Every structure is written in structure tokens, then in C-alpha cells.
Amino acid sequence: MTAPRGIEGLAKNEKSKLLADLKAKAQNRRERDGDEPAMLETAPVGPRAFDFSTMPQHKQLRMMAAAAELSGIANPFFHVHEGRAGATTLCGNRTLLNFASYNYLGLNGHPEVSAAAKAAIDRYGTTVSASRLVAGERPIHHELEMALARLHGTEDAVVFVSGHATNVSTIGHLMGPKDLILCDALSHNSIVEGTRMSGATRLMFAHNDLDALEEHLTRTRSRHERCLIVVEGLYSMDGDMPDLKRLVNIKRRHDAWLMVDEAHSAGVLGAHGRGLAEEQGVDPNEIEIWMGTLSKSFAAAGGYIAGSHALIEILKAGAPGFVFSVGFPPALAGAAIKSIELLEREPWRAQKIRTNAKLFLELCREAGLDTGTAINAAVVPVIIGDSTSAVMCANRLYEAGVNVLPIIFPAVPEKQARLRFFITAEHDEAQIRETVAIVDREIRQMRTEMPAWKRLAGGG
């Protein structure tokens, strides 16, 4: 019995006939089905896989939007701003007092910053067109990293194209399943996601409760290889800061690394805007990892890590957010370099933030507004209560001429929903006084109307 032959075993004339038959059948099928590929004939009938409106997340969003519309509550997010983010902002044909942008030093749009960005484009173009490992390395990257190292008083630094990815990649790359990470309960999402990516054991301690941190370390540190403590220099929801000196002592005793996220404190804290270490008189080299972003004080975008040469070499060789991302854009690098130079030349900008924040806090407290544990720095919350009330209050303020956004559950606990004010060096005394007066008036009026409104909206 002859073994079956494949197509390659057919005689030449047999192969030609078979191919001709297949082509004819395919042509007949295309004519019958209107050129649709044959494989679609077997596609299952039912919801299309690409119809995202069927996903639970989208259905929940639509339900929330419908409930807000029924209650007469407008969406306070995604207002279109038609110009530079400064002490005021233009929405449509209205100029509003602006407390929703973190242009802390007032350098966004500064003539020297804009000129530096344009000069970088003229030399390098709008992109370096490759990851830095491959062909994207440019002199401007090294210049920026040296400026950041100088600002923080460290040996070296590395920039990432995303602030969020900076934390995710750094923590995820340095730590592993046998390690322990301890985070403040108010840690930013990027810190939490970095911990998850690492596979390390994560323990959260109550906000700024360093006694609880020590208890965790005493109980669990010995069961893990490496240990990382992560805090923020200025907390983005509460506007307060940790005790850095005590943290250094704790990490020494428990053989841990300390990482400080300076996203909101670089350019803000310290007499010269050098951050938490300058603010509290601590040698910055006592801290293993300094993280920061360029989107706030430094009029750009992206993030960075500052620390030892060895740390930076490890991250440049293996951190996914660096290795697998395009090199930092030239225009943003130029803007950030010039912003750091301006801060060094004009430290009054950091000092003005503190003066403005001090006045804002004093006026809020005189009015009986709840500002929580905020210090006189760039972030000041006014705590409202439940999320619905916070959204309603933000909408009232928008109509009254103040642009400030609500922070609601799950970003904060439900009964701690708030308005978050960003105080900058560009605000003047008159703007601050006017804003606090409007906030006080609108909150008082809202609360007198609250019983009837709650019956309508079902608010808590």
C-alpha cells in the first residue's frame, strides 16, 4: 500500500489541477459573500469583543453620570482651558482664579523657559526617536540629569518619560518577592503599583505614624531579604510632610532603604526649593532614593530618580520604564534645565509659595474651614465631607469664578472628600483673599441648602 502523499508529493499536473480548483472555490466564495474572508463564516454570534460599552466599568460610569444628571450635578472634570496654566485660567470667555494647576514656581510660560524649549527643538527636533540605549542618547539628557543631581545633592540622576512610570519601574525593578516594602497609607497610586509589580510583601502604615512603621519593622523585617520604606516629601492630598530625621534613624536601625517621593516638594520645600532634606536639615545622601517629577515646579513632564552612581547605573540598565521607552523629549529637557537654573537664581519663588500658603491657611482657619494637617506649602485641602457635597461645592465655586477640583472617594475616604488647592508663587495676596472669601461664602450657603438638596440627591 502506498503511503499518503502531501502536496509536495503530487505530480506536477496533479498539483496544478489542485491549486486551480482551490483558487476557483475561493473566488466563488468571495463573490457569494461580498469579499468577506471565509474565516468570518465561523465567527460566533453574540456581543462583539471590541464593544467596550458592555464592560461593567463602562456601565458603572454611565450609571454614575445618569445619577448626577438626575440630581442636577454637573461634571466638574475636563473643563477646557484655553491658555497657559497660571494664577488665573481662561475657560470659554471667562477668566477664573486658578487653584487647580501645579505650576508651583510660575515657570510655565516663562520667556527663558520657552526659549530653552524652542532651542532644544531647533537642535534635536521634537523627539530623539529611539530609546536612549539604542540611539536616543543626547547631551541634553546628561545636562538635565546633572542639574537634578545638583538640586538634590546626590551623585547622579536619571530621567523617565513618565512620572508614574518612574515609581512603578524603580520599585518594581529594585525589589522582588523575597523583599518587604512599607508605604504610608496615603502613598500615591504609582507607589502602590510599583510594589505590586515587584511581588514584594507590602505593608501600609497609618499616615505619618512612624510608631506604627517601627512596629511593622520589628515584627516582620527579619523575614525578608531587602526592605524599602517609601514616603512622600509633601503629601498630595493632605499637604503635610513626614519627619525625615526620624525616618533616617528608623531605616538605619532596621537595615532598610528609604525612598522619598518629592513630586510635590521639589522646588517648594526648603529655603532654596531643594526639597524635604533642605527643609528639615538632613544630609540628602542619608536617603538612598530620591524621586521627583518635572511636571510641577519644573514646567515640563516626566519623572526622575536621584541617588548614587550605582543606583542610577542599575536603573539605566534594567528599569522597564527607562529601557523600553523612547528617550526624554528635547523640548521638555530644555524647559526643565532652564527651570532648575531659574530656581537656583531666584529662590524667592519657593519662598513666595510658602508666604502665599501661610496666608491662605490663616484665612481658611479664621473662617472655620477644615484644612486638616496641611502646612504652609503648595498643597492645601479644604475638607468638605462626602463626595457628592465636594463635587457640588466645586461646581458652585466654578460658577463663582474659582477653578478648584474635588478629590473624592476612592482617592480619599468617603467622609474626607475635599477641595484641593494648589498654591503657587504667581498668586498674589488679593487673589488669595478673594478666593477664601468666595469659598467661605459658597460653603456656608451650600450648607444652609443641604437638607433639601440631600432629599433630592440622596446625599449622605
Image (cartoon, rainbow, N blue to C red):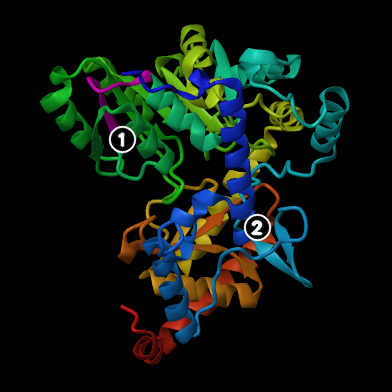
Say which element carries label 1: strand
Of callouts 2 and 1, which one flags the residue occurring earlier in the amino acid sequence? 2
Based on the displayed image, in which of its 4 quarters is residue 335 positioned?
Answer: top right
Whether pointer 2 and pointer 1 mark residues with C-beta atoms closer than 8 Å, the reply is no
Q: Position of residue 319 (x, y in %)?
A: 48, 20
Residue farthest along the left direction in this orientation: 219
Q: Position of residue 409 (x, y in %)?
A: 37, 61
Mark 1 neighbour density, 10 Å: few (under 14) some (14–19) many (20 or more): many
Residue farthest along the front direction in this orientation: 1
Distance from the alpha carbon under mark 2 to that under mark 1: 64 Å
Say which element carries label 2: helix
Mark 2 or 1, closer to the camera: 2
Mark yes or no: residue 279 visible.
no
Identified by mark 2, the residue type is: Glu
Q: Is residue 273 left or right of residue 452?
A: right
Judge whether residue 179 is colored magenta: yes
Q: Nearer the viewer, residue 44 or 293?
A: 44
Residue farthest along the top direction in this orientation: 310
Judge whether residue 139 is colored magenta: no
Q: Position of residue 88 (x, y in %)?
A: 72, 60
> In the picture, which quadrant includes the N terminus?
top left
Q: Which residues are magenta?
A: 174-183
| Rendered position, 49 above or below 453 | above
Q: Which residue is mark 2?
A: 31
Identified by mark 1, the residue type is: Cys
Q: Which residue is mark 1?
A: 183
> In the picture, which quadrant includes the C terminus?
bottom left
Residue at the spot 43% in from the left edge and 38% down from the top edge = 190
| Rendered position, 224 above or below 296 | above
Q: Nearer the viewer, residue 189 or 290?
A: 189
Q: Is residue 298 left or right of residue 421?
A: right
Mark yes or no: residue 119 visible.
yes
